Amino acid sequence: MLKGFKEFILRGNVIDLAVAVVIGTAFTAVVTSLVTNLFNPAIGALFKAESLNSLWIVKIPAVGGGTADIMFGAVIASIIQFLIIAAVVYFVLIVPINYVKKLAFRKAAEVGPTNVPPTELELLAEIRDLLANVDNTPTHGKHPAATTVDPPAPTA
């Protein structure tokens, strides 16, 4: 059981996923700070509000008295934050990786295939040709490799 767990943990994709989660968490903190401290106040200034979270608040009466706040501005802020994260991931990660892949594919296409092992059909054709070139002298039902030379007669 522990052997299976060890194999699972040491797989490359599990470690890559763990690294991605850690970096994603740190990256989220940076983007959240940008959106909260830079974009939300700038957009809020356009609509004469301190931030999007305090913009477009609808108060509805609650059953037990008082009011409940529906905060459309906070939803819009979350949508903007998502779009910013998606744009940064696309332009900082996806575009460069696709460009590098395209360069590597182009370079591999120029070089051509190297050390490509023969296909099964090619191997079978080679075996057929080798068997066709074997000396086809009759050996009276014996395999050519099984023929022996008669031993010399004993001397008296």
Image (cartoon, grey):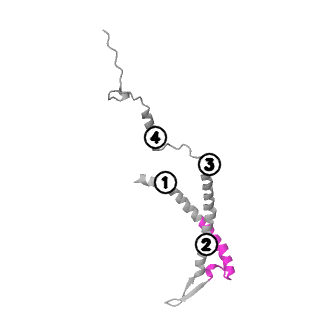
SS for tag 4?
Answer: helix
In the displayed structure, 121 sits above or below 10; it is: above
Circles 4 and 2 in contact, beta carbons < 8 Å: no
Tally of numbered discs: 4
| Closer-to-camera residue (9/95) | 95
Which quarter of the figure is the C terminus placed in?
Answer: top left
Label 2, secondary structure: give it: helix
Q: CA distance from mark 1 to mark 3?
A: 33 Å
Judge depth for marks 4 and 1 and give the one in front. 4
Numbered circle sitting on residue 146: none
Above or below, 145 against 86 in this view is above
Question: Mark 2 touching mark 3, by CB under 8 A?
Answer: no
What residue did someone put label 2 on?
A: 81
| Rendered image quadrant of residue 26 | bottom right
Q: Label 2 is placed on what type of residue?
A: Gln
- Say what amino acid the circle numbered 4 marks: Leu
Residue type beneath disc 1? Arg
State which tag comes first along the sequence, 4 or 1. 1
How many residues crowd around disc 4 within 10 Å: few (fewer than 14), some, or many (20 or more)?
few
Q: Sequence-wise, which precedes: disc 4 or disc 2? A: 2
Q: Which residue is mark 3?
A: 110
Point out which mark residue 123 bears.
Answer: 4
The structure residue drawn at horizontal position 37% and vertical position 28%, both measured from the top left corner, is 144
Sequence-wise, the earlier of marks 1 and 3 is: 1
Q: Nearer the viewer, mark 2 or mark 3?
A: 3
**Residue 56 horizontal side relative to residue 121, left or right:** right
Mark 3 element type: helix
* Residue on which disc 1 sits: 11
Q: Position of residue 132 (x, y in %)?
A: 43, 34
